[in-house]
Every structure is written in structure tokens, then in C-alpha cells.
Amino acid sequence: MNEQKVALITGIFGQDASYLSELLLSKNYKVIGTKRRASTENPWRIEHLLNNKNLIIENGDVTDFSNMLHLIDNYRFHEIYNLAAQSFVAASFDEPLHTFEVDAIGPINILEATRVIQRNTNHIIKYYQASTSELWGDQFDTVYDNDGNVLYNYQDENTEMNPQSPYAVAKLAAHKMTQLYRNAYGMFCCCGILMNHESPRRGEEFVTKKISKYVGRVYKEIKKMGLLQMSNEEKTSIITNKIGKLQLGNLSASRDWGHSRDYMLAAWQMLQQDIPDDYVICTEETHTVEEFLKLAFSEIGVNNYMDFVNINSKYMRPAEVLFLRGRCTKAKEKLKWKANITFRDLVKDMVIYDCK
Ligand code: NAP
Ligand code: F7E
């Protein structure tokens, strides 16, 4: 019989950790998930997994080297997925030091602890670093036709990186360190450069969840109105007076949005390869925030979506990433991975969840 694999997932209460836990548990892994010690805990994303005997939750703060060292020493891990992060780009402008501590120093703590333990035990531990499309910042490459006309812009593993936020700078430090541990010490380390990925379990401060949650509230108000004979204008005005308008920032920013469930499969696949490498994971499509907004409202039969929105400068960023659209030829070829959940299905999934 094969030895049961043991995996560490840092940041177990986060969105991606919930889907990755489901995947690993379905493959009979023992999963050790770490959470930060907190006065109140909210494991809602993995509530359905808490009775699984193969899931163990431990306290673990990635900013504490000794904490990471003891944890990695206590278990014979085969795989480590470092998902823990201060992951909200906007907050990183207010908390640059905290963000750097968690998102850059945190991964170095884990890499260094892994290196020491691996050296002492000769037991190979594979490491996954949650890198991000934010690393590219304002950079992209372009494909031209024979007449020199632009066909499309994209980012892939070879695109220059020019981070535009404290979050992205910290993640770039972690990305480079992960590559260094692979090259200098021969460790099995992979960076998954993942484009934005969402789900009904997305944190409420991110724009997709903010929209789907608001649309869910509008839907409930429309349902309460039942068959009342009213114009759309009257309905809109009653609803926005009651629940307020949705406050948003830059609607023209463009993102390559996929589903977290699909992307966590790619993260796992990276660690199943014989040779460690870095991979871009994306859908190869791009949509603006406004397109997301329009589609989300159309799911509940509302077309006058802009009447529900107020553009609020509070949600504009000091520096913005305007355009993201990935190209993941390498992942398709080497991992045999592709995104299965379309943009339309993602929006639908989130809106249906928030309408319930
Ligand atoms: P998430 O929902 O914000 O999850 C991150 C988790 O990390 C949270 O549960 C958080 O715990 C935990 N954490 C924060 N500080 C910590 C610390 N010092 N020690 C241990 N845990 C800590 O993020 P996600 O969307 O699942 O993303 C997972 C990873 O992928 C992150 O590293 C993110 O930066 C990266 N990423 C995400 C995307 C995306 O679009 N989702 C794209 C590219 C890369 P609390 O709940 O206590 O705050
Ligand atoms: O913003 C614009 C905002 O906060 C998306 C993280 O998972 O993906 C995520 O980072 C876009 C930006 O995600 C609002 O300006 C407009 O252009 O949902 P977001 P993000 O910054 O792209 C990357 C890949 C990660 O690695 C990160 O961890 O939407 N936007 N109005 C708004 N954004 C927010 N949050 N709120 C608004 O009201």
C-alpha cells in the first residue's frame, strides 16, 4: 500500500485553502492546516470538512520562524502549500510593513525551516509558493499580425515584472526567494503565478464578492416586492433608498478571472511533476469590472445596473494594475491543465450563492 501523503496548508481559513483541502482530502492526504491564533475564529469556508479525521488544524503564524520550524519538524510533510498572506492589495497601501512581514518574510521563514529540516532528515519536501499576476504590475507583451497591428496583449512566464503595490513588491520578494531556494539549494520549489481567481468563498472586500453580495441583496428586495405594479425606475429608487448604492472604484480595470477550484487543481499538479518549475495559471480571457457588474445584475434580470452604483474615490488606489490577461501555454502543455469554469459560470455561481 502507498504511504499516506502529508501536506501542510498555511492560511487554512482562506478561500484557496478551502478548495485545496477538499482536493487533497479527496486524494486521501493527511492535511495539516495552519491558522493564526485569534480571539474569534471563523472557519466557515471549511466547516463541512472539520469532522474529517484527515484534517488537523494547528496554530501557525508564518511570521514566526520558530513556529514554522517546530511545525515542519513535527510532521513528515511531503508537500507544503504556502497560501497564507495579507492578500488584499488595497490594504497593503495602508499596511506596507505588515504586508511585507507576512507576504515576503513569511515565505522565507518556511523555506529556511524546510531547508534545515530537509538537510537533517534527507526527506524531500515539495514547496508551493502562491505567486500572483500582481507581479507584472503595468507590464504586458503584445502579439502583432503581419501588418504590425496589435492582435492582443498578454502576460506569461517571460513578461517583465514591475509591481505596483506593497503587496506585489512583497510577493515579488517571495517569488524570487522561492526561485533562489530551488536554484541554490536544489530544493523542489514551485511558484504558481495565478491570475485573479474567485468563488462564492471569496473574501467580502474583493470586488467580485462585493458585487455578487450586493446583487443578492437587490434580488431579495425585488422578491419582496412580488407582483407590485411599478416601473423599473420606481423599484430601483425604493431599493437604493433602503439598502444604499453599491460603492465602487475603478470600473475600467481589466482582469483575467477564473475559479479558485480550477486553480487549486493546478497548484497540486505543479507539485506532482518530476521537475520543479513556475507556471502561469489563467483563463486567457480578460473582462473589466464593469463587465462583471453588468453580467452579475443580468443574472437577476436587472439591466439598469449603473443606477445601483456610486463611484467612490475611496475605492481608487494610489497605483492601479489596469490590465491583466494571461497566457498559460506552459501549464497546458506540461501540466495538461486548463480552466474549466468560464467567466459566465463563475459570475453565475457567485450570484446564485449570494441570492440564497
Ligand atoms: P485569503 O482568502 O485572503 O487567504 C489567506 C489566508 O492567510 C487567510 O485565511 C489569512 O488568515 C491567512 N493569514 C494572514 N496572515 C497570516 C499569518 N501571518 N500567518 C498565517 N496565516 C495568515 O486569500 P486567497 O484568495 O485564498 O489566496 C491564497 C493565496 O494566494 C494568498 O497568498 C494570495 O496572496 C495568493 N493569490 C491569490 C489570488 C486570488 O485571486 N485569490 C491570486 C494570486 C495569488 P485570516 O483569515 O486570519 O486573515
Ligand atoms: O480588485 C477594482 C480594483 O481587490 C480588482 C487579490 O486576490 O487578485 C486580487 O487582487 C480590481 C482592481 O483584486 C473596487 O481597483 C473597483 O483593479 O478584487 P480586487 P486585485 O486587486 O486584482 C490578485 C491576483 C491577488 O494576488 C490579490 O491577492 O477591481 N475595483 N472597485 C475594486 N476593488 C475592490 N476591492 N473594491 C472596489 O470597490
Image (spheres, rainbow, N blue to C red):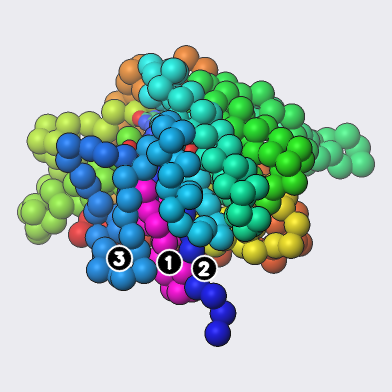
The residue shown at (62%, 58%) is 123
| Crowd band around label 2 with a 10 angstrom C-alpha radius: few (<14), some (14–19), many (20+) | some
* Mark 1 Cα-neighbour bin, 10 Å: few <14, some 14–19, many ≥20: many
> Is 219 inside the magenta-drawn segment?
no
Relative to 49, residue 280 above or below: above
For ligand 2, the image quadrant comes to top left
In front: mark 2 or mark 3?
Answer: 2
Residue 8: x percent and y percent? 46, 54
State which tag comes first along the sequence, 2 or 3. Answer: 2
Q: At label 3, which amino acid type do we have?
A: Leu
Element under disc 3 = helix
Q: Is residue 270 left or right of residue 320?
A: right
CB within 8 Å, label 2 to label 3: no
Q: Quadrant of the N terminus?
A: bottom right
Magenta region, residue range: 17-34
Image position, residue 285 (x, y; %):
61, 49
Q: Are marks 3 and 1 in contact (CB under 8 Å)?
A: no
Disc 2 and disc 1: Cα gap in Å? 6 Å
